[in-house]
Image (cartoon, helix red, strand yellow):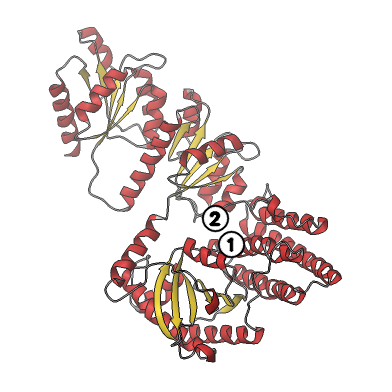
Amino acid sequence: MNNRFEWHKRYELGVDFIDKEHRKLFSIMNKLFEYGENDIKTQWICQEGIKYFKGHAMQHFAEEEMYMASLHYEGYDRHRRLHDNFRKQTLPALEKELNETGYSPDAIKHFLGVCAGWLIGHTLTEDRAITGQTSSKWENLLPEEQIKKVSQTIVQLLNELFQLDSRVISEHYGGEKFGKGFYYRLVYSSKDDKEWEVILIFEERLLLATMGKMMGEQSDKVNVMLMNAVRYTARQFVDRIRIHFPTIASYEIKNESLLTYEQFQKIFGKQQPQCSLLFDTGEGYFAYCDRSPSYLQEEMGTTLEANNTTEEIKNYLKKEEENQKKKILVVDDSSVMRQAMQELLGNDYEVSEVSSGVAALQSIALNRPDLILLDYEMPVCDGGQVLEMLRSEKNMSDIPVIFLTGRGDPESIKKVMALKPAGYLLKNLKPEDIKANIDGFLRRQEEAKNNQAEPRKKILVVDDSEMMRRAMHELLGSDYEVSEASSGVAAIQSIALSRPNLILLDYEMPVCDGSQVLEMIRSEKNMADIPVIFLTGRGDPESIKKVMALKPAGYLLKNLKPEDIKANIDGFLRRQKS
């Protein structure tokens, strides 16, 4: 979910006071992310933002309705009905969820998702319809009494099937995304080939909390068996609802399919449903949508049949899983740096950006990232303070943080590393090196999470000679995970990102020689026990004596045969293991 709701020229109606108020509503939504630069309490921020949003929205609705009345706008009653539903049902229900859950991340995500989706959708269609720029997307709604009857039936069914005390969030659900959803489509037809379509949307946590529990599933993910159970339950669900539609009561099911969110949005783009309801069940969100037969023109999703159902559900779940990219939050007061990181990482990761520490905390509450890239030098609240705040919050303290810093001198690096982040990256590194470091870090995180087989031993080669580094990589790369650094500063950075089992350290390097690098490593408690073997080109007794006085784990002469160097390293790591 994006962290800002940007105003675009296409939203303008050409009515000054309405356009001004719409911009203000967008601004208020953004205040829910940025409000209160000196306060880190998410609940307080949300309470104040919602109070302001609600008050302003109510005032705007009243002024807009007066304007429509002055024009004798023919869609006035329908438009007012949409306003009433939002102010009397949607906002109170969302507020209630926030209060009852103590402003949980899911509740905040629901609030912002529904409000932002409603605001943008309403502005682009219903408000533009006032000035004749488009037609209303809700022209084909069922009568209000019939919608009420359907919503009451669904609430009753949810209670009977799952003992859920549900409530209607909106009677005009506009297709907004809520959490991770599964979109199940059913098409019914009559003997004379008339059709009726229903789409049911289940939030993943709702399925796990209901059907999953009933089936004794222990997984935190939806699987094929659970999806099959949901399908058959959903059919019975729709059959109960059809009782209230006499004209379609005799229709038979024609096909069923699973939709992606994009396919679902495409359907909504063609024509809004005649009945579209959003419910909060207390265990997750549920939506019900049906469309009039005259608007069924295209097939969406592969039809589920007896001979392909299991395979299609597997493929659907696999694609849904693959679409869940790792999430990276970039926290930097520089818009140039944020944009650069977005361009560098956006193809492979879901990247969100914020410009301050407070905004970071709000973003994390809404959309927990897998990794935070945190600028160390920021005004008001610097990277060190932001990291401290993150670690003070139980539900955020385990998110890995890699510092972004423009300073690579030993003193600055020592200051950064004293805070014990997951690592740090210099901003002046080549973009491909920054990305390689991030890719590697997240890959290792995933491997650890999946409890894969014991990973290969890690060796860090530190040498200012590219030729020597390449030679060591070729010699050791088949049996070990080899990383390289060309300087002492780069070595410390690499160690922070990926702790090696052994460091092969060139003794003679410019700027910061091997002895200084060893001293830096030993000064850090979390690095001091990493064994270091010096690589040296000097084999005379005086040089060797000088090297060994530093008490490394050993030393190797660079002019040894490659097989002898590898045999020494293999033997050392074997002894370390035992």
- Residue at image mark 1: 113
**Is mark 2 in CB contact (under 8 Å) with mark 1?**
yes
Q: In which quadrant will I find the C terminus?
A: top left
Rendering quarter of residue 224: bottom left
The residue nearer to you, when weighing 574 against 251, is 251
Q: Is residue 241 above or below residue 335?
A: below
Which image quadrant for residue 207? bottom left
Q: Residues within 10 Å of mark 2 (few under 14, many from 20)?
A: some
- Observer-nearest of 204 and 381: 204
Mark before the other along the chain sequence, 2 or 1:
2
The residue lying toward the viewer, choosing from 451 and 233, is: 233
| Disc on res. 1 | 2
Mark-to-mark CA distance, 2 and 1: 8 Å
Q: With 340 as the anchor, is 566 left or right in this view?
A: left
Q: Is residue 166 above or below residue 25?
A: below
Secondary structure of the residue carrying tag 1 is helix
Q: Is residue 16 left or right of residue 195?
A: right
Which three-letter amino acid code belongs to the residue tagged 2?
Met
